Image (cartoon, grey):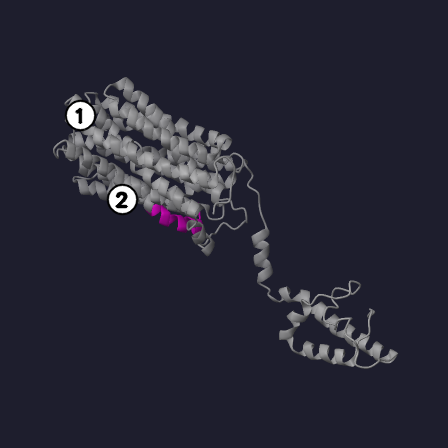
Amino acid sequence: MSVERKSTDCDILQIQGEQNHHHQQPQLNHQAPQNPSEKPHNSFSSPTSEKPHRPSSASAASASSTAVEAIESEIVTAAPAAPATDPEQEPGLEKTVSFIAPPDGGYGWVVVGACFLNNFSMLGVMFSWGIFQQLYTKEIFPGQVSAVSWIGTLAFGFMYIVGGVFSLFAARIGYRKMILTGSVLVAGGCVAASFATEVWHLYLSQGILYGLGAAMANPCILAAPSQWFVARRGMASGIGISGSGVGGLVFSVLIQKLNASIGHRWCLRVLAIIVWCSMVTSALLIRQFSTTGNRAVNVSMKDLETMKRPAFLIMISGVLLTSFGYFAPLNLLPSYAVDHSLSQGQGAMLNSFLNGASFFGRFAGGVFGDRFGLINLMLFCVLASSLTTLLVWMFASSLPVLLVYVILYGLLGGGFISLLAPVLAEQFGMGSLTILVGVTFGVNGLGSLTGTPIAAAIMASMSGGQGGAGGNGVGDLNVYKGAIGFIGGTMAAGAVVMFYLKCKVGGKHRTVAT
């Protein structure tokens, strides 16, 4: 190594003194060389414009060069080795940068099938609650519309609200254990409800116990398909969640037939067997997928920061407003039909058509969301659901008009619910998906927990506290108008908030939410 200028003994002593005081070293290392021909690491020598105090001989120059080389060699050699002194930093860094791309197919389709099966039974029975509500209010507990409406509301509310808490456990201990445990609670809720003799018995069994079991399984079922797909994420999620639409279609008819043939008590016991078998099969087939290979997830500061982002707060605000009205038609339509001089069978048929249309809506929502933008389509579904409720259901009093409404509402409402998890994955990434899904659907549960009882209370106030319409033709329409206005109005407010979300993050292409 050669030094292209002369260095004085004072220079050497100065360098040696600075080498012994490490707190001065960063300042010297950042000093830019004055001579362009100097080597980059020779940055701590005195400037070439500085005149020496006395002439130096060749031997002095040689000694200076040797000292500078020795000192520079120690400093430059030690500098890159500093990061390696922390043995835990490099493994952590490797875990952060390693990435396993989702297969966008493969075993992911088995996972989608498992989610479809779970939703077919567990949510299919829940989406057929209107059949039980009509039975309880007309035959088992007559005149207690407001009280009975809380049973199905508790089931939906616990599934979504408590599901937000259970999502933390699901991310940590695994989906399979959560679903298996949930299957026992769901089946137990049905069996316990078959022995109920008071409304509060049904609160505890068909409401809370069933809802807790569903809360354990639902975050897993919602998050799993999106983990395995990217380009077809919306379609995969739509297929998985559409099982609830098919289940609602099938179980609405099945429950009506079983109640008529073997009574509602044995009907609940048969449902317990069907739901338990389906959920166990789903649990055995489902698998988690992680882009980092680490399937056990802890709640981190990153997750909390994500939940504080304005885009996420806006989204859950829109979901909350929409959820106040989203589930109410499922619960009120069978009673609405009977109060408008239609038969119980026709009321059950309306519920079946709504759930059947919801199947196509959930599937089509995922497919078209991938093409036109997930947020774009979610906004359209919420806005169109609101307008359909306010403009069609508000003035419907005959079976054909009601059929038009339930088909339109099923298509649009199904699209909304199927797009929530894909939108979360698209806007906020996969790292915290299970937790974010749980929180979002927990907020959704707050609205569903109170939406139907509020609508029922509005009906009761407009009917003089009787809680029902009583089959008086045109008068019945006026009783339901206030509830329908509440349902459509809250969804319209949700659409306004989601429009603001679209303006903030865009709709068609993936963005980084801030």
Q: Nearer the viewer, residue 443 or 271?
A: 443
Query: With 147 as the anchor, is 17 left or right in this view?
Result: right
**Residue 243 in view, yes or no:** no
Instruction: Pick whichever, 19 or 213, lies toward us.
Output: 19
Name the residue at 37% across, 25% down.
357
Disc 2: which residue: 208
Above or below, 480 against 283 in this view is: above
**Is 166 in the magenta?**
yes
Q: From the viewer's perspective, tell me whether residue 201 is left or right of residue 235.
A: left
Q: Is residue 481 left or right of residue 436?
A: left
Which badge, 2 or 1, comes first in the chain's sequence? 2
Front disc: 2 or 1: 1
Point out residue 198 in the picture as x, y percentages from the top left corner: 16, 40
Dot 2 amino acid type: Ile
Badge 1: how crowded within 10 Å, few (<14), some, or many (20+)? Answer: many
**Number of numbered markers:** 2
For label 1, the SS is: helix
Residue interval drawn in magenta: 162-175
- Residue 398: x percent and y percent? 24, 19
